[in-house]
């Protein structure tokens, strides 16, 4: 049983579970960029990726197959290897009194597991019992915008359409998009082997499983996770999630209905004050956020903030954010930093 929610106030022994994947690789990059206090870094992977050499801080580290012995005396586990892997190792991590920050959906909706976006609900991180869940990428981007706007007037309803890059499907999907696009341009189109359909000059509805209500898992993640993060179980939120032929960075078209009329100027002022956001808006040049603006960057770009002409209490806006970075890896590292900074 953990006696404190905080991480030890010293350099930490950290295990990165799923270190060779797109999110795991970005976690390593961010740990180095932010000079996170580390005494020992262990790179864990599947048997397929075991033995891969990864450069970190000028050193060559070798990925290891995850075993109980590799978790010995670990302080922090940053996991991005999928829900089944996280469930497999959760007991081992807890036996070490370590903290698991998990990027999968395995624990997100469990009552005793905080679901945290540091800029939105940082205090929830202190309620953990060894596990903190990283929200879904689209949810992180959305709640960064909804939370400050909710301070102006309570949000009643949200309608979202997502334009999700192939990075959300992993490194192999990113590589395949480049290959399939090249083959298409050469007049030799190929079928996808990673995704249900080719994304070369194409798009399709999100490839997560369909549920009995005719929404897919990705869409219900947005609804359920947003409610939990904003601590509003009554929030009405519906989404349509679409996979698009963009390598990296997700976009979202968002319609928000408030209890009261919220002027766009008020919304912009509030968003400018919020952490992790930047405004990109130039109506004269029709210049608003694009995926290229945010790839590899920490901030979420927001723009096209306007009154909904069909509802005086509504606002429309557009946002873009790097799915691998703030939508996954950066958020996980920020959660860990939060628990050190609060010491």
Image (spheres, grey):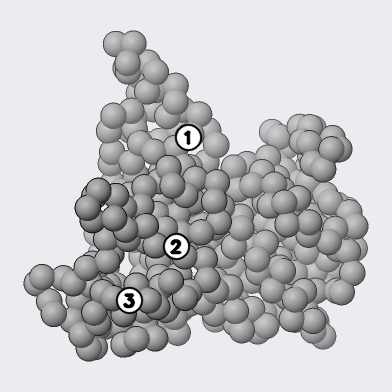
What is the distance, in whole Å, between disc 1 and disc 3 at their CAs?
Answer: 36 Å
Q: Is residue 270 left or right of residue 298?
A: left
Question: Measuring 28% from the left and 41% from the top, which residue is drawn there?
Answer: 204
Q: Where does residue 199 sit, x and y in percent of width and height?
A: 34, 32
What mark, if any, has residue 254 been given in the picture?
A: none
Q: Quadrant of the N terminus?
A: bottom right
For disc 1, the neighbor class at 10 Å (few under 14, some 14 to 19, many from 20) is many
Question: Measuring 27% from the left and 66% from the top, which residue is drawn there?
Answer: 305
Q: Nearer the viewer, mark 1 or mark 3?
A: 3
Q: Is residue 192 visible?
A: yes
Q: Is residue 132 left or right of residue 142?
A: right
SS class, disc 3: helix
Which corner quadrant of the image does residue 240 belong to?
bottom left
Q: Where does residue 112 sit, x and y in percent of width and height?
A: 60, 81
SS class, disc 1: helix
Q: Is residue 24 left or right of residue 299?
A: right
* Of callouts 1 and 3, the N-terminal one: 1
Which corner quadrant of the image does residue 133 belong to?
bottom right
Which corner quadrant of the image does residue 264 belong to?
bottom left
Above/below status of 228 relative to 287: below
For disc 3, the neighbor class at 10 Å (few under 14, some 14 to 19, many from 20) is some
Q: Quadrant of the C terminus?
A: bottom right
Q: Which residue is mark 1?
A: 173
In the image, 216 versus 202, the foreground residue is: 202
What is the distance, in whole Å, between disc 1 and disc 2 at their CAs?
Answer: 29 Å
Question: Measuring 32% from the left and 16% from the top, which residue is drawn there?
Answer: 185
What mark, if any, has residue 267 been given in the picture?
A: 3
Q: Which residue is mark 2?
A: 278
Question: Measuring 18% from the left and 81% from the top, which residue is drawn there?
Answer: 313
Q: Where does residue 340 sit, x and y in percent of width and height?
A: 77, 74
């Amino acid at each position: 049983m953990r006696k404190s929610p905080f991480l030890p106030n010293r350099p930490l022994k950290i295990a990165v579970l799923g270190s060779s994947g797109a999110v795991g690789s970005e976690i390593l990059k961010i740990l180095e960029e932010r000079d996170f206090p580390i005494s020992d870094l262990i790179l864990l992977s599947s048997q397929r990726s075991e033995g891969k050499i990864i450069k970190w801080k000028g050193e060559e580290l070798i990925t290891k197959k995850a075993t109980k012995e590799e978790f010995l005396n670990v302080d922090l586990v940053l996991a991005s290897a999928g829900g089944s892997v996280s469930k497999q190792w959760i007991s081992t991590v807890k036996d070490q009194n370590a903290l698991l920050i998990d990027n999968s959906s395995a624990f997100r909706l469990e009552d005793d597991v905080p679901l945290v976006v540091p800029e939105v609900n940082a205090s929830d991180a202190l309620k953990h019992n060894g596990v903190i869940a990283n929200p879904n990428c689209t949810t992180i981007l959305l709640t960064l915008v909804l939370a400050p706007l909710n301070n102006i007037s309570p949000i009643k309803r949200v309608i979202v359409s997502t334009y999700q890059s192939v990075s959300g499907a992993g490194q192999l999907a990113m590589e395949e998009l480049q290959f399939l696009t090249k083959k298409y341009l050469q007049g030799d189109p190929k079928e996808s082997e990673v995704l249900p359909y080719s994304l070369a000059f194409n798009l399709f509805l999100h490839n997560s499983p369909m549920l009995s209500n005719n929404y897919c898992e990705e869409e219900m993640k947005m609804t359920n996770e947003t409610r939990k993060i904003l601590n509003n179980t009554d929030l009405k939120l519906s989404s349509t999630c679409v996979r698009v032929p963009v390598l990296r960075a997700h976009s979202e078209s968002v319609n928000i209905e408030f209890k009261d009329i919220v002027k766009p100027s008020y919304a912009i002022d509030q968003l400018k004050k919020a952490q992790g956001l930047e405004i990109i808006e130039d109506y004269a040049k029709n210049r608003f956020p694009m995926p290229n603006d945010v790839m590899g960057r920490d901030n979420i770009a927001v723009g096209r903030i306007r009154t909904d002409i069909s509802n005086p209490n509504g606002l429309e806006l557009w946002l873009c954010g790097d799915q691998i970075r703030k939508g996954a890896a950066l958020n996980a590292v920020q959660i860990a930093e939060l628990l050190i900074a609060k010491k």
